[in-house]
Amino acid sequence: MVAYDYAMNQCAYRVTLPENAVTKITLDQTAVTLPQKGYVQLNATVTPDDATDQNLVWSSSDSSVAEVKNGIVAAKAPGTATITVKSSVWPDVKAQCQITVTDEVGADVPMSEFLLNTSSVTMLAGTTYTNVRLYGYAPFYATDLNLEWTSSDESVVTVEPNGEGDELTQYAKLTALKPGTATVTAKAKNGTASYDLAVTVTEATGSGSFNIVGDTLVSYSGTESTVTIPDGVRVIGENAFKNNDYVLNVICPDSLEEIGYRAFYDCDNLQSVSLPETMKVINEGAFYYCKNLKTLGHTDDGVLPKGLTSMGVKAFYFCEALEGDLVIPEGVTSLSAGIFYNAYALTSITIPDTVTSMDANGDQFANCTAVTSVTLSKNLTELPKTAFFTCKSLKHLPDLSNVTSVGTSCFAGCAALEEMVIPESLTFIGANAFARSSLTEITVLGDPTGLDSAFYNSLNLTTFVAPKLTTIGKQMFQGCTALVNFIVPDNVTLIGERAFQGCTNLKTLTFPASYKAETLSFGLTPFVSCPAFEGYVIEDGASIVRTEDGTLLAGGGKVLVSLPRDFKGHLLHRA
């Protein structure tokens, strides 16, 4: 506080006011049952009502079951979750509400408002644009995200849905037909919310100039739709064509050997670049965000020129239209991170034996959603994280017999896999490595380490076979809702923390007669959010023994595994 006298002299004082602490928080509901897609508003009351700071912090013990924002709870998936509200200053003061989400599915909640990722687009006549999508919406618990798209002038630009599956209408494809302007409108299919996108269509004027130093094309400026690079150019330099939205086609000379850093960065309308077979180096981000690039002149012959020896990080990042059966040239020995990330139109991938490593930062072929088959180099022993993430048309895992390690989420989201037999050679499986498959049966032949959330949300999984496995990892089967009776593999000695979390239909864990492990231990709450779980089935001959009071013993009754819930110990006093 600053005080002044009549002469405007001032003096500063520091005044400390006594805090009036929050002593209690109460909720208007302490237990709520909701269907999936349901929601409820929890109202918190702070005591005393004149507390110094009444700000609250909300959290959920399991956001995959129930999400909370500012007291509004949205039901996501069957299971249970605890909603906690705390004082932001005195966090020990809190209140809780138990949320139970049933198998019932409630009515969809429409969007009251939404945004697209852009409000204006400039295009060339004869081109398409696919980077239009739903970006944000309210309320956060809305479940009906379907949009309807219209154009105010279809002679200038047309619009059509361009997503996949449940997200079909959340994305749009614009096709520019002639110069002019139009408004593309997205409207909530089952609501009144809408959003306008201004579209301007222009036509290339047909002039341009090169800045060439020695054998390097330093830059190009112009509005030509087709650019022919002069003979003798060996290198296309860094950022040479960056952000040029006029160029549709580039014809390269046979002398070209190298394309520099981000040479064609964000050339939105670029459709084709003819690269000579003698091409050697494509540097980092060379074609980054060239979303309409369809061909490099080798669509029917491996996509890439055969003389290529090196491709930099994210060289073809977000080249969504690049078509064909990709064959990595034999001169390439390592695959950089994110090379073909979001290359939606590639249909297969062949990696030759000359390739011996993949960058640990991964994402090499993530979201290549049309790829149906992958052939791996026999000399690759480690697959990095997210290398084939969401290759959701992939029908069969590649031959992994030479692979020892699969990184985090490497094959997660490969929902079209028709079988999964993980070979004995694989000694490490990263978190979520094979998550979200649609398989009913998974077989693991060896005893790999890792395995945390390895098969997370594999919603159709009913059978798991692993004759040599000793560890069921943390959250390994989380969300595998089709599991009903899980048969414990014969050699398992550890069932990890929350191993079966959210397996809402799991009733029993069976120890078969062939189960012979000498020890067994459980991590914390392996069956959390398993409302149907009834207990264990122990077949005659299994090395697990259950006593009359429910105590589990391993090793033929010699090793304590677990005690019954109502067990009460006795305090012994030493004399």
Image (cartoon, rainbow, N blue to C red):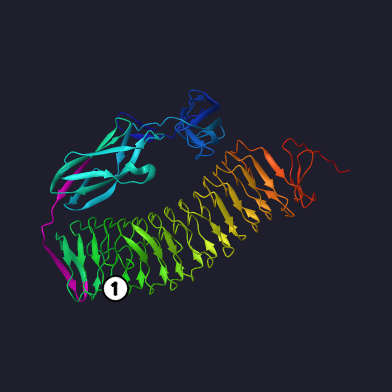
x and y, in percent, of residue 532 in the image = 61, 36
- In magenta, the rendered stretch is 197-216
Which residue is situated farthest in the right direction here? 575
Amino acid type at mark 1: Met
Q: Quadrant of residue 362?
A: bottom left
Secondary element under disc 1, as helix, strand or loop, is loop
x and y, in percent, of residue 142 in the image = 39, 34
Mark 1, residues whose alpha carbon is within 10 Å: few (<14), some, or many (≥20)?
A: many
Chief secondary structure of the magenta portion = strand
From this view, report whether residue 156 is shown above or below residue 218.
above
Is 35 included in the stretch rendered in magenta?
A: no
Question: Tag count in the figure?
Answer: 1
Residue 21 in view, yes or no: no
Q: Residue at the location (31% across, 34% down)?
A: 188
x and y, in percent, of residue 271 in the image = 23, 59
Q: Is residue 72 left or right of residue 461?
A: left
Q: Nearer the viewer, residue 59 or 151?
A: 151
The quarter of the rendered structure image containing the C terminus is: top right
Residue 427 in view, yes or no: yes
From this view, report whether residue 337 is shown above or below residue 159.
below
From this view, report whether residue 248 is shown above or below residue 570.
below
Q: Nearer the viewer, residue 71 or 110?
A: 110
Is 201 included in the stretch rendered in magenta?
A: yes
Q: Quadrant of residue 120?
A: top left
Q: Is residue 294 left or right of residue 546?
A: left
x and y, in percent, of residue 191 in the image = 32, 30
Q: Residue at the location (20% across, 53% down)?
A: 127
Which residue is label 1 attached to? 279
The quarter of the rendered structure image containing the N terminus is: top left
